[in-house]
Image (tube, grey):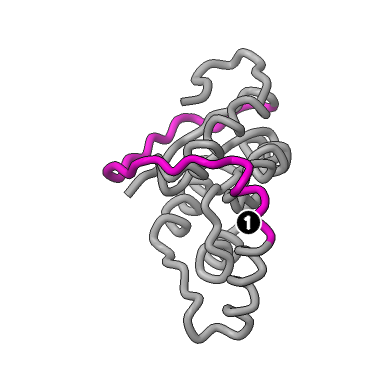
Amino acid sequence: MGTHDPQEVDYPDIAALVARKVASKEVDRGILVCGTGVGMCIAANKVAGVRAAPCHDDVTAEISRRHNDLNVLCLSGDLLGEKLADRLVEIWLKTPFEAVGMPGATRRSSTWRSATASRDRESGGIGRRAGLRIQWGNPCRFNSCLSHLLTQ
């Protein structure tokens, strides 16, 4: 899903496709790449049930999963090198969500539930789950975005 050539695309459309698959539970996680990662993040977070954020280093990749249960990783194709991007994806995939025993975990869980409850009622559908799959291509250029879906 996404684009695999240098032609300019409307990244919000790609972000919405990935976000809807994550929100419907058709896939567990998604990875979006654009110039900075911020535009994809904004577009993906408009879909109920999606928790997207741009990550730029090992700490943000790990904490976004461990403390915030991020389900859509947004990366910069212009600002991150391919080795760093690959490492961030690896860290993000291997890091589990650890809400139990974490200060504020109950508060955050209930906040997320209440914050997304109305959006979830509007969006409806629950989908299916499949096996783990990741595809990684070359880093994109500004406005030429790649998206990757992960399921487990």
Residue located at (48% from left, 37% from top): 21
The one nearer the camera, 86 or 114, is 114
Residue located at (42% from left, 54% from top): 90
Mark 1 neighbour density, 10 Å: few (under 14) some (14–19) many (20 or more) = some
Q: Secondary structure at mark 1?
A: helix
Our reading of the magenta stretch's main secondary structure is: loop
The one nearer the camera, 80 or 62, is 62
State whether residue 126 is above or below residue 17: below
Residue 111 on the magenta segment: no
Q: Which residue is mark 1?
A: 117
In the picture, measured across the screen, residue 25 lies left or right of residue 57, that is: left
Q: Residue reaching furthest top?
A: 7
Give the x, y percent position of residue 126: 44, 43
Residue 132 on the magenta segment: yes
State whether residue 96 is above or below residue 72: below
In the picture, measured across the screen, residue 53 lies left or right of residue 24, that is: right
State whether residue 132 is above or below residue 92: above
Residue located at (61% from left, 13% from top): 7
Residue located at (64% from left, 52% from top): 53
Report the span colored magenta.
115-142
Q: How many marks?
A: 1
Identity, as a three-letter code, of the amino acid under mark 1: Ala
Give the x, y percent position of residue 80: 61, 44
Give the x, y percent position of residue 104: 63, 81
Give the x, y percent position of residue 8: 66, 16
